[in-house]
Amino acid sequence: MQSKIDDIYRGRVFSVYDVVVNGAIVSGAVIAALALPNSGDAFLVPLIVSALYLTAGLRLLRGRVFFAPPSK
């Protein structure tokens, strides 16, 4: 996407992407800290996360959101 941005705005776009990625990393850490118990023994959390990944992957494949052939 950044290849389609004019050079004068490319640095700003990169900065926004950088902030979004850093925010996602921090949000993931906060969610993990809230979801995991203090003892560290969490058998259910990996199962829930893997089920969410599987569900998202199947929905993407079924809907062909990213795998659609180019239109003619």
Image (cartoon, rainbow, N blue to C red):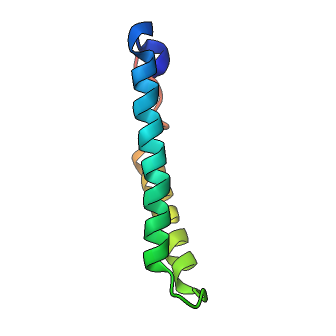
Residue 56 visible at all: no
Q: Where is residue 17 in the image (x, y as percent from the top left)?
A: 44, 34
Q: In which quarter of the image is residue 47?
A: bottom right
Residue 67 drawn above or below residue 35:
above
Q: Position of residue 52 (x, y in %)?
A: 46, 67
Residue 63 drawn above or below residue 27:
above
**Residue at figure coordinates x 40%, y 32% from the top left:** 16
Q: Relative to the observer, which residue lies in front, 32 or 56? A: 32
**Residue at figure coordinates x 48%, y 49% from the top left:** 61
Q: Quadrant of residue 31?
A: bottom left
**Residue at figure coordinates x 52%, y 64% from the top left:** 54
Q: Where is residue 11 in the image (x, y as percent from the top left)?
A: 45, 19
Q: Relative to the observer, which residue lies in front, 53 or 27? A: 27
Which quadrant: the C terminus?
top left
Q: Relative to the observer, which residue lies in front, 50 or 19? A: 19
**Residue at figure coordinates x 47%, y 20% from the top left:** 2
Q: Position of residue 56 (x, y in %)?
A: 45, 58
